[in-house]
Image (tube, rainbow, N blue to C red):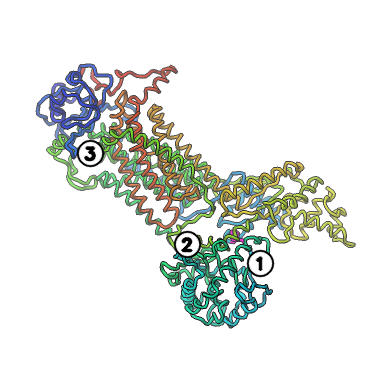
Amino acid sequence: HLGQKFPQQKFQTNTQNFLDKTMPKEEETNRPSKRLSIEPEGWRGSQLDSDSESSDEESPPPKRTSRLSLTRLSVTKSASTRKSVGSGALKRVSGVSMRVSGASENGQRMSIATAPTVVKDGFWERLSRRIARIPRIFLLTTIVVSTILSIIGFTVGGFEAGVDNAGWQSRGTDIANKQTQLLLVHRHKEDLFTEGRPKWVDLISNVQPGWQTESLGDDGTDDNISRRLTAYEEEESQWHLESSHRELQAATLGLDQAQLGQRLIAGLPNCNIAWYANVTDLLYEEHLWPIWKTESPSTTLLSPNMLRDICVAEENTQRVLEANNFCFGCDEGCLPPYSPVLFARIVVENGFSMTCQQLSEGWETYQAATENSWAQCTKDLKLVYDANGFTMPTSCPPGFTAALVEENFDSNKFMTYTSSIFATNADPKVMYDFVEQFDQGVEEVLYGAYDTQYEGFNKIFTDSVVGRDMMLACASAFITAIAILVHTKSPFITGIGLLQIILSFPLSFFVYTLIGGLEFFPFLNFIGVFVVFALGADDIFVAVDKWKNARIENPDADTETIAAIACPDAAGAMFLTTITTAIAFFGTAICPVAPIKMFAIFCGLLIMFDYLMCCMLVFPALCIYDTKLMEGRSNRCNALSCGARKREDDEEEEEEGKMSLIHRILFGYYNILHKLRWPLLALSLIGFGLSAWGATTLKLPTSAEVRLVGEDAVQFEQNFLWRDNLLQSSLDKSGGSTILVGFGIEPADTGDHNNPKKWSQLVLDPTFDAAPEASQRYLESFCPEMFAEEFASVPWEDYECPINRFATWLQTESAKASPDAGYAFKCGGASGIPVPEANFDACLIEWAAQNEEYDVLSLDGKVKIIMMDVGIRIRFDSPFDDLENEYNTINTWMTTKSASAPATANKVIFSSQTFWWFDTNRQMLTTATGSASIALATAAIVIFLSSYSFALTFFATFTIGYVLTSVTSTLVAMGWTLGFLESICFAILIGVSVDFVIHFCHAYAHAPGDVDRHERTQQALIRMGPSILAAGLTTVAAAIIMLFTVINFFQKFALILFMTIIQATVGSFIVFLTLTDCVGPSNPTYLADLIKAKLGFGGPQGDSDDDSSSPKKHRDGTDLTTDS
């Protein structure tokens, strides 16, 4: 192409004139240069002897030739003056090897090698040329079509910017399928019992609507209530005047219960003191309940001074409550809060008439006796406590409940935490506006954290800060936009880049809903916007830098040629990171929890459409931008670019001595890395080993509780966490929970597992038949044998399984002289189990109808389902290991028991909300490890297919493994466990950990043939380093903004994004580059080519066939450095 444009001799003359100004002097070229060193007055290149350097262009090239050496081999130097090549164009020769050089701070000369560019004529190159010819049409068409698809997607797909946050349970697993059927029956058993066949047909034939408008407990009530078991009976703490007297040890307080009651009545005349005796109301209704904590590790809360400070704080808060009518209990004013202060006023004579200071002085003589009494009571209470009922230990003084002391008070007699329960009856939403007026104690002495029993304030606060945190998240996106503008120096390119990121959301939604058919769009999906902002900026940086590099190497080429060079190269580099990142997100879709699965799918789509939009919007925008620059129209800050166009003199000066700051920094960095490469390699290996070990110590949480706000964020969260230290919370947890056991149903979930709004059909066990004698005897013995096991207990006092109550009824009726008519007509005179098989179903149905026994369900005169409740030792917030052990214990017993059961009753199933929650958390762990494996395997496959290098594949996979393990071990050191929110964040970690190293890997393998490993490493760093650093700094800046959010998920999302980018940068710039600089392949594809040759698919190409060995030539022998 150039040979046709210019006469051959003139072309060579101009070429030599240009190179004379950029190449070293003759004496420099005759001096051997040490490979990869930066010598004074020297230049960077491969080591060549003086003979090869002085040879002309016809001389055969050496077998090992660096890209930089091509210039010295193909052109002889001359001292002519450079002439203008064309009007309005840069005065360089397109396609000629050149160097942008400069001086470092110590005077050393540095250079960036730019090799002759051979433009291919493949499909992508031709497509790029077409885009460059009509960039405006292509750009506008893409915008219009994308906008239309976006509108269709939002309209037809029914997009709503709401918070759809249901579905946070596993689906499709064994435990989930069991709980689905048991809960389906449990919720509809009354309708099945009363409505009969129509309801059965509905449940069996139709998928039922979702169960989650709010989380339900095992009894179908609000989960908040189910989670806080009412373990105490009123008799446990009744200590007012009418309660039964208990003898107290004389050494305890010197008062009997009657005296205590008299003092309470005398101190609170015209007040309803019965509230203090109603433990259900006191401890389990929604009252204002501050938790107090001593700020001094040496001062117990029962000390006189601390008691005085609590007293003052209570009085100040009580005045606020009374002024706003938030409390109750007395004709005038309100009952004082139940707390150690109230106990002290009762114990101390005339305590109710004392000021706080006087009370503290009088309390001093009772402190030691009270501490001894409470410590013994705490110890005894732990021993005798039973959720199904118990007698309060005699060591517990009247007026004591477990809400006054912390769990370990019996061992140290030191009180760090205690509580006050105010007699409030106002809605938490009303009281919330006055929280700031409540007295929280004395700074650095006593601190009080306020909330209600069921976190009324915390829920209101969480809802109020979501909008604020979303604004901060949007601010992080703004930071990304600023970074793109700074990097591109073009408002036009920045605007198109942002449009690319923004359009990826509605286009992904279009495919998500209308093509994928996914209806559930959880709130979590909106977090994908911030993920795509981080990764989308990386694509923009790569596209812009690839274009810049192509323009530097081909300064006089037209825009079509630059597009043919840069666009396929950039698209290929971005495709590698896009496909690996997208599959990493798609891999997380193995999670059976709908919101996380949908989040993974939507993020994968976002990544793919961001890549597609980058190719279809940014590339034509770069063509427009480049055309304007080449026409010399960018003389000031305008719509396309900020900064005046350089004059020709400036360009000559830059050619002779200027190099960008970032390249000078990267040159200096490489010099250091090269000198220290072996120590760095050793450190990298050690670091990976330590990180891998640290990552294996990641544990599951000790509690399945999901907290949306951190402890340091607000007093409401402190209230929740501190309350866990009270004996009351400890006893509640030890109370256990209940499971459902069912015969006649099969584990199944026939609904859409991706949509919590579509639940399941009822699936019956066709083999279940309770009528045969063997089945009756097995069912009768089932409950007694189960309750005899250590893991099981009756769920409440006097509970008896339905089949056993039925047996008792049979005995009772058979013994009567005039038995019930239903019994006489339908039970065949049975005096117990077994009932004659022909009569069993009718008899049991009759008994169930008389007693409204909803746990026995029948259809068409046949018993279909029998349900029962069983108490177990653990709760939803028990440690994960305890949950797992308890489930395995019960499951083993059930399996063993079923093995000896008759075929008509051997498919018993059990589950509960507790075990469903356990299964959900277990699936999180499986997802984290599984998706990480998928990400690593995908990255390895993509890297190998793109580089055909086993060594680079291993290096890149090793580096990605380092990023994953180093981030994980760092988070473990910070106290993270693999909880619910953390699992979501790990999905993001896996998705964004692969990008940087793949960019470097692609750049390292870019040069074909046999090129020195050091030069490959250096060129990879110089070519891709600026883009990676820009993307990394942009994402880190955006993550730092989000660290100031309050919601736990946003904080953890920001932290894991921050840590991932930091470690991905360290991994790519240190671990990967050190590996390649030490032991990287000089010919990455050699081994793959050799294997192909052995298999008969071709052979390794020699150096003589390497495109980088020498410039392409026309048939007449002239250089062909570009090919249109």
Residue identified by numbered label 2:
718
Tell whether position 848 is magenta: no
Q: Nearer the viewer, residue 1081 or 559?
A: 1081
Which region is colored magenta? 225-229
Q: Nearer the viewer, residue 660 or 958?
A: 958
Q: Position of residue 725 (x, y in %)?
A: 53, 61
**Which of the two discs, 2 and 1, sits closer to the camera?**
1
User: Circle 3 — which element?
Assistant: helix
Q: Amino acid at mark 3?
A: Arg
Question: Mark 2 near mark 1, Cβ–Cβ under 8 Å?
Answer: no
Q: Which mark is residue 664?
A: 3
Q: Position of residue 616 (x, y in %)?
A: 34, 39
Q: Quadrant of residue 640?
A: top left
Query: Could you tell which of marks 3 and 1 lies nearer the N-terminus?
Result: 1
From the viewer's perspective, tell me whether residue 921 is left or right of residue 153.
right
Q: Position of residue 334 (x, y in %)?
A: 54, 78
Q: Nearer the viewer, residue 393 or 111?
A: 393
- Alpha-carbon span between mark 3 and mark 1: 79 Å
Q: Quadrant of residue 488?
A: top left
Tell whether position 227 is magenta: yes
Residue 845 appears in the rendering = yes
Q: Which mark is residue 392?
A: 1
